[in-house]
Image: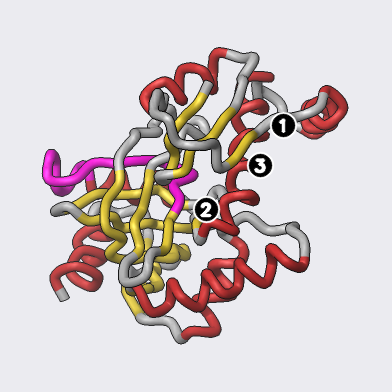
């Protein structure tokens, strides 16, 4: 099957229904040449299965495999994974990023509770950002962290917000060094030196194209309001 993901023509041939279903909204029937072709060997997939956590299905592991391959190969196209929950508000994308278990999805659901149909989630785990000359665009992907939220949408990137847990809710602006350190751990890495150099150039360009924040938050409803006031309303 051929898909259009982040305006890249991607060829893949999933075996399991998980990726087939998620990729269906991304199907591409145009005449453009393929930018990225994704495939895996039985040996590679078996190694992934041997390391999977309890309760993870083979279909979910295949989706993870395709997502990992895409996110590494997309780097040369000025495109990067940001491990995050992508919240859409007023025509712009706000990516709430954190390590697994911190509660990025819980936090964006507080926004849904607070703001209703004024907001929605485009992708709850693996959106990507593509860099153009004067703008950064956030794209949904068919790669999913388990929520099933993987919409084929794109919006101008307004901000990337790194979450950390705390007793009180607050927002601050990090310096460039902290942004790059946090981005590194929330994107595809373990890449070749050549690709790593391109990845760092992508980071540097992204710094000039969007805003970054650190949100210290608890699990109270107030966290969404504090975030809105500090990131959007200001």
Q: Which mark is residue 81?
A: 2
Which of the two discs, 2 and 1, sits closer to the camera?
2
Label located before the other in sequence (2 or 1):
1
The residue located at (45%, 58%) in the rendering is 97
Distance of mark 2 from mark 3, alpha carbons?
Answer: 11 Å
Which of the two discs, 1 and 3, sits closer to the camera?
3
Dot 3 falls on a residue whose secondary structure is helix
Q: Nearer the viewer, residue 172 or 70?
A: 70
Distance of mark 2 from mark 1, alpha carbons?
Answer: 22 Å
Q: Nearer the viewer, residue 98 or 150?
A: 150
Q: Which residue is mark 1?
A: 53
Left or right, 8 with reference to 217: right
State which quadrant residue 121 falls in. top left
Q: Quadrant of the C terminus?
A: bottom left
Label located before the other in sequence (2 or 3):
3
Q: Which residue is mark 3?
A: 69
210 falls in the magenta region: no
Q: Residues within 10 Å of mark 1 (few under 14, many from 20)?
A: few
Label located before the other in sequence (1 or 3):
1
The residue located at (18%, 69%) in the rendering is 229
């Amino acid at each position: 099957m051929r898909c259009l993901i982040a305006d890249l023509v991607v060829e893949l041939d999933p075996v399991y229904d998980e990726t087939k279903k998620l990729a269906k909204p991304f199907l591409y029937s145009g005449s453009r040449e393929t930018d990225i072709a994704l495939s895996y060997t039985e040996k590679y997939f078996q190694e992934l299965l041997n390391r999977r956590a309890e309760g993870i299905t083979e279909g979910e592991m295949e989706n993870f495999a395709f997502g990992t391959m895409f996110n590494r190969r997309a780097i040369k196209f000025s495109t990067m994974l940001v491990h995050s929950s992508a919240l859409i508000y007023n025509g712009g994308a706000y990516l709430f990023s954190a390590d697994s278990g911190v509660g990025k999805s819980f936090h964006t659901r507080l926004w849904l509770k607070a703001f209703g149909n004024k907001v929605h989630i485009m992708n709850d785990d693996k959106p990507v950002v593509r860099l153009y000359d004067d703008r950064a665009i956030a794209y949904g992907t068919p790669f999913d962290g388990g929520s099933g939220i993987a919409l084929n949408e794109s919006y101008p990137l307004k901000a990337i917000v790194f979450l950390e847990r705390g007793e009180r809710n607050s927002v601050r602006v990090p310096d460039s060094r902290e942004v790059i350190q946090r981005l590194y751990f929330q994107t595809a890495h373990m890449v070749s030196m050549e690709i790593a150099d391109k990845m760092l150039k992508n980071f540097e360009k992204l710094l000039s194209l969007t805003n970054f924040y650190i949100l210290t938050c608890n699990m109270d409803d107030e966290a969404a309001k504090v975030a809105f006031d500090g990131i959007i309303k200001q």
